[in-house]
Structure formats: structure tokens, C-alpha cells
């Protein structure tokens, strides 16, 4: 086999490897990720700037959900929460995934103010109740209240998308003015409450990009470049 044909086969093989790696990276995980960020203080802005999606109150552990099947909440949820429509989000200025942010407001005022957000799912539905995207908290989060009161402060929750298609699917809900967002959560170590999770507009809360596919693509391209350089060196010798 001629050197040129052999070189072409190597390059095509590397391209195929990169394609398969990127494809497998984008399909390996079923869910995006909820990322716990820094502290946010919303005191004085009023409840009109945010919507309660899930509010839990129980001792010593809280668990509950707002889903398409149970929009007013199940488990330890309170009457403050509810499945929120895309139209409700748009009414407070959340017009796309670029505006989308969540606040975990721990409101523990008892003798043991610390609590653990043990699990959290944020789920987007289309108008018929089909799941469009789901995001999970990868690890439990130990939190301490920042200010007393419900809705004044908390920890930023942002979404790490599985891929661009997942983000586009949620943006399509906003474009169509159709769909809903709900949550399920478990909070442990509570002795007071209620602990709530809000959705609100936060234009600076950009989601964390998914790095895996880009790293694989970059590694594959570097391999192609290295092979080209090696072949050119051999041809000059």
C-alpha cells in the first residue's frame, strides 16, 4: 500500500474515532446536572420577581415533588409551591435558558440550622406532559441559612446541560409559550422550615458548559495534526 493511501486511512480512522467519541459522550448520560453555586441575596425585591416551584416543611427530613401529574405537590410540599408554566416564567422576565436560574432558600431557624439538600431533580415538560429535559443534583449539598425568612437569600442553582440540543429543546418551549417546570427534592437534618426552591430571572447566571465532548473533539484533532506533522517529517527525510 502506498504511503499516501496509508496516511489517508489513518486520518479517516482518527476522524471516525472522534465522531464516535463525541456521539457516545452526548448519549451516555440521560440527564443534565444541577450545579450549586454561590450565595444570592434577594432581599427587598419582592416575591413578584421569583416563583416558588417546591417548598418543603417537615422534621427531621423533608421530601416532596411538583410534577405534571401532581402540579400542586406531593409529600411534604406546602401550598406555596406548584408546577410552573413557561408563561409564568416569561411573566417574571425569564424568556430563555440564558435568563434561567434557581434559588435554594434554606429557612431553618431552629437549634440546628444546618441541613443537607440530599437530592434534587428539575424537570421540564412539554404542554402534553412529556419530559423534555431532566437535571439532577450529583452530590448532596450541606447548607447553612444566610438570612432568616423565606425568599430573601439562598444558594444559586444553575443548569449544566447535557448538550446543546438539550438547551435548544428548553428554549423551544419558551418560543412556543408552552411547557412547564417541576421539581422533586429531599432535604435532611431539618428542624424548622419551610425550605424552598424558586425560579427567577438572573441574566448573569450562565450555565456551566458540558466539557466532555469538546475535550474529546480537541484530543482527536490534536491527534490528526500530530500525524500530519509526523508524515511530513518522514517525507522530508
Image (tube, grey):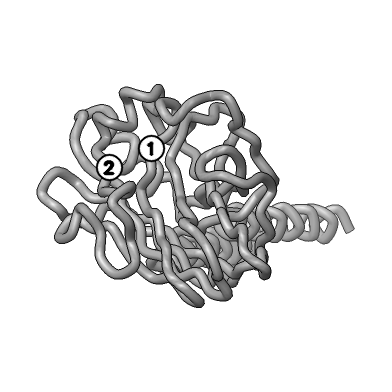
Q: Residue furthest left?
A: 128
> Closest to the observer: 73 or 15?
73
Circles 2 and 1 in contact, beta carbons < 8 Å = yes
Q: Residue at x 53, y 64 (%)?
A: 192
**Residue at the spot 51% in from the left edge and 64% down from the top edge:** 137
Q: Quadrant of residue 39?
A: top right
Residue linked to disc 2: 84
Crowding at mark 2 (Cα within 10 Å: few <14, some 14-19, many 20+): many
- Residue 162, relative to residue 3: is it above or below? above
Question: Mark 1 packing: few (<14 Cα in 10 Å), some, or many (20+)?
Answer: many
For the question of whether residue 81 can be seen, the reply is: yes
Q: Quadrant of residue 28?
A: bottom left
140, 125: nearer the viewer? 140
Q: Residue at x 47, y 74 (%)?
A: 59
Residue 2 visible: no
Q: Give the Cα distance between marks 2 and 1.
A: 8 Å
The relative height of residue 186 versus residue 67 in the rendered view (above or below) is below
The x, y position of residue 194, in whole percent, is 46, 56
> In the structure shown, which secondary structural element does the residue marked by tag 2 occupy?
strand
209 and 181: which is toward the camera: 181
- Mark 1, residue position: 51
Q: Secondary structure at mark 1?
A: strand
Residue 147: give x, y in percent of width and height. Answer: 66, 45
Relative to the observer, which residue lies in front, 43 or 143?
43
Picture residue at 40% right of the left edge, 26% below the top? 48
On screen, residue 1 above or below 32: below
Percent coordinates x, y for residue 7 in the rendering = 62, 62
The label on residue 94 is none
Q: Which circle's residue, 2 or 1, is located before the other in the chain?
A: 1
142 relative position to 150: left or right: right
Amino acid at each position: 500500500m502506498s504511503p499516501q493511501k496509508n496516511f489517508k486511512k489513518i486520518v479517516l480512522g482518527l476522524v471516525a474515532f472522534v465522531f464516535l467519541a463525541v456521539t457516545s459522550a452526548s448519549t451516555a448520560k440521560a440527564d443534565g446536572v444541577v450545579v450549586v453555586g454561590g450565595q444570592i441575596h434577594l432581599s427587598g425585591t419582592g416575591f413578584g420577581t421569583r416563583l416558588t416551584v417546591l417548598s418543603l416543611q417537615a422534621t427531621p427530613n423533608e421530601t416532596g415533588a411538583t410534577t405534571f401529574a401532581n402540579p400542586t405537590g406531593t409529600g411534604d410540599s406546602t401550598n406555596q409551591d406548584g408546577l410552573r408554566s413557561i408563561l409564568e416564567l416569561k411573566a417574571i422576565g425569564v424568556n430563555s435558558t440564558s435568563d434561567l436560574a434557581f434559588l435554594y432558600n434554606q429557612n431553618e431557624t431552629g437549634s440546628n440550622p444546618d441541613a443537607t439538600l440530599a437530592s434534587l431533580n428539575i424537570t421540564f415538560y412539554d404542554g402534553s406532559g412529556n419530559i423534555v429535559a431532566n437535571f439532577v443534583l450529583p452530590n448532596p449539598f450541606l447548607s447553612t441559612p444566610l438570612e432568616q425568612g423565606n425568599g430573601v437569600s439562598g444558594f444559586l442553582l444553575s443548569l449544566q446541560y447535557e448538550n446543546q440540543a438539550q438547551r435548544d429543546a428548553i428554549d423551544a418551549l419558551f418560543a412556543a409559550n408552552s411547557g412547564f417546570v417541576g421539581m422533586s427534592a429531599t432535604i435532611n437534618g431539618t428542624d424548622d422550615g419551610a425550605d424552598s426552591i424558586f425560579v427567577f430571572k438572573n441574566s448573569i447566571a450562565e450555565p456551566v458548559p458540558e466539557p466532555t465532548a469538546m475535550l474529546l473533539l480537541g484530543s482527536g484533532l490534536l491527534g490528526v495534526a500530530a500525524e500530519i506533522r509526523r508524515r511530513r517529517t518522514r517525507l522530508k527525510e
